Amino acid sequence: MRRQKVVLLGDLFGEFLKSEGLEQGIKRMEVFEAWDSVVGARIAELTTEKFFKDGRLFCKIQSSVARTQLFTQRVDIIKKINDLMGFRVVKEIIFK
């Protein structure tokens, strides 16, 4: 039996994720990891809840001081997260 077409394993895995509807979940986890990386360990510890949907990243921050500081830096944080992701995935960050 001869193979008609050679398929790379990475392409096959990507197709599997798409067909099973898991692609959005993987992207969401990557955004959360990028958040932790960009804001640092201390702020990541203060972030109690994260939710990502439709380009909006919702973050619940325990400290009001940290929340205010992050609010003033949100444009830079969005840019850094998108740079880590390789494309514009986060459009807005909402702090609670």
Image (cartoon, grey):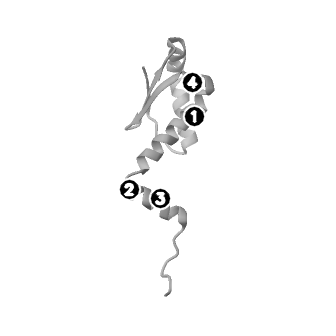
**Label 1 to label 3: alpha-carbon separation:** 25 Å
Of marks 2 and 1, the one in the foreground? 2
Kindly state the secondary structure of the residue where label 3 is placed.
helix
**Label 4 to label 3: alpha-carbon separation:** 32 Å
Of marks 1 and 3, the one in the foreground? 3
Q: Which mark is residue 14?
A: 3
Q: Name the kind of residue labelled 4 in the image.
A: Glu
Of marks 3 and 2, the one in the foreground? 2
Mark 1 or mark 3: whose residue is earlier in sequence: 3
Of marks 4 and 3, the one in the foreground? 4
Is disc 4 surrounded by few (<14), some (14 to 19) or many (20+) residues within 10 Å? few
Question: Which residue carries the number 4 mark?
Answer: 45
**Label 2 to label 4: alpha-carbon separation:** 32 Å
Q: Is residue 80 above or below residue 86?
A: above
For the view shown, which residue lies furthest in the top direction? 65
Residue at 51% in and 71% down: 7
Question: Which residue carries the number 1 mark?
Answer: 80
Kindly state the secondary structure of the residue where label 4 is placed.
helix
Kindly state the secondary structure of the residue where label 2 is placed.
helix
Mark 3 or mark 2: whose residue is earlier in sequence: 3
Q: Name the kind of residue labelled 3 in the image.
A: Gly
Foreground pick, 57 / 72:
57
Question: Which residue carries the number 2 mark?
Answer: 20
Is disc 2 surrounded by few (<14), some (14 to 19) or many (20+) residues within 10 Å? few
* Contact check, label 2 and label 4, Cβ < 8 Å: no
Kindly state the secondary structure of the residue where label 1 is placed.
helix
- Quadrant of residue 76 within the rendered picture: top right
**Label 3 to label 2: alpha-carbon separation:** 10 Å
Quadrant that contains the C terminus: top left
